[in-house]
Amino acid sequence: MINQETIVALATPSGAGAIAVIRLSGQNAITIAADVFQSVSGKDITQQKTHTIHLGHVVDGAKTYDQVLLSLFKGPNSYTGENVVEISCHGSTFIQQQIIQLLLRKGAKMAQAGEFTLRAFLNGKLDLSQAEAVADLIASDNEASHQIAMQQMRGGFSNEIAKLRQELLNFASLIELELDFAEEDVEFADRTAFKELLERIEFVLKRLIDSFAVGNVIKNGIPVAIVGEPNVGKSTLLNALLNEERAIVSDIAGTTRDTIEDELVIDGIGFRFIDTAGIRETKDVVESIGIQKTFEKIEQAQVVLFIIDSLQLINDNGNSVKIEIEKIKNKFPLKPLIVVLNKIDKLNTEERIQFDNQLAIINYPLSIEISAKQKEGIDALKNELLSFVNTGALRNNETIVTNTRHYDSLLKALEEVQKVKYGIESNTSSDFIAIDIRQALYYFGEITGEVTNDELLGNIFANFCIGK
């Protein structure tokens, strides 16, 4: 499967910058680079040691393109396991393209998305879950997702899976040996010890599967819908959370007619806040569409902030607000809902007493008082949002699953392990147990890449950026 052609691509983001890095990888990477590189000291780079850097010029005959630094990495001691050359040139897009085109003319071919990391996997420098972590690391935009990607890239997840697979493989060998001596009616595998191993594997798999709920929200961010009646301060709250004027704020009801989204990192966890159109009865066609979108966003959100104007609450007998809260809870019973009591700074002493009385009528267990305009209570709200994310596993540096493909393989592996366990408990014959063990081993191997195919690799590496 390993392509012997030498590939080239821009390893830094496209566009102008201070410097750009052009990467070559393949059997002929050093000879191709030597054909276009003139060292200022007259050195022949084909004769230089690995992991060295050389100053010189990229030239094509008498034409000089740029003064560059050339980094040399000889296989197998490189990222891809092949000969790798990295050319650090000035960041002009013209210079970048001229050098890449020159290298293509000298025999290199353009790299496909993720092809450098694919070669690292095929050459045994990374297993498949580590290779996927490279893409997650590049995409990480907060501390938590970065921490998980780094742990996976260092092999934390792979090592845990490999250990389970090896222990299961050892017992599988004994079961297979029994099949060779089927006529002798002997048992080489201690059924009691095997059952204990299966229970331990089952426990670890369940823990990894459960961790996906946390890992998925850390990787993709937690969508939070900000909902409520018009003019209760939804857009002001969004601006206060983001600490910028992201949404238009007006005393005119119905100002927000479409959803506005933005992201915020709170203590290393990403949250995606969605400011929605105010919920009310309206004949305005455009506003009606916005309100319809509000309910769609509530459906997609994992947490709902229901905003109430504290002054309006005083004039309400408590019933209408309570009814609105119950409507959302009945429509979305599994979604956490925080009642946010806004404009609390506008209440005088007498109004505060009335407010407390009305709040007792609502009697909702999870409510927070804020002033979005004065940015009071915002930290308390952020802390409440963090409470919905179980970061205990993250703090304890436990393995957390963030990849849907891994999650699917773990579920299938667990199902097969439970079949094996049932077979042991019901004294099923060794040949049937062996089939289920092989299938469990297959799903373990799928995660780390010991079992793979071209279609799977194509799907995984197609999501990488070119140059990585």
Image: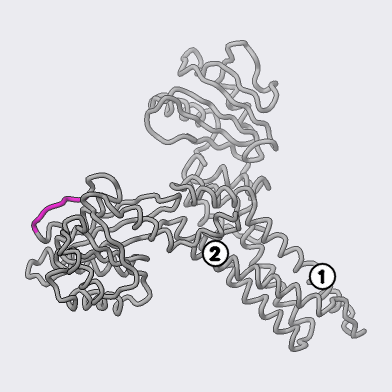
Farthest residue, direction right: 184
What whole-number distance in Å separates the C-alpha atoms at marks 2 and 1?
A: 31 Å
**Front one among 292 and 79:** 292
Magenta region: which residues?
A: 247-252
Q: Is residue 143 above or below residue 71?
A: below
The kind of secondary structure element at disc 2 is helix
* Image coordinates for residue 167, horizontal then vertical, percent: 76, 66
Is residue 426 depicted above or below 468 in this figure?
A: below
Q: Amino acid at mark 2?
A: Ser
Q: Judge whether residue 115 is colored magenta.
A: no
Which is more toward the observer, 351 or 157?
351
Q: Label 1: which residue?
A: 173
Residue shown at 26% from the left, 57% from the top: 370
Mark 1 neighbour density, 10 Å: few (under 14) some (14–19) many (20 or more): some
Which one is nearer the viewer's eye here, 328 or 163? 328
> Could you tell me residue 277's position as x and y percent?
19, 62
Which residue position is annotated with label 2?
Answer: 211
Instruction: Please report whichever mark, 2 or 1, sits nearer to the chain's N-terminal start.
Output: 1
Give residue 141's position: percent from left, percent from top: 43, 47
Magenta stretch: dominant secondary structure:
loop
Q: Quadrant of residue 203?
A: bottom right
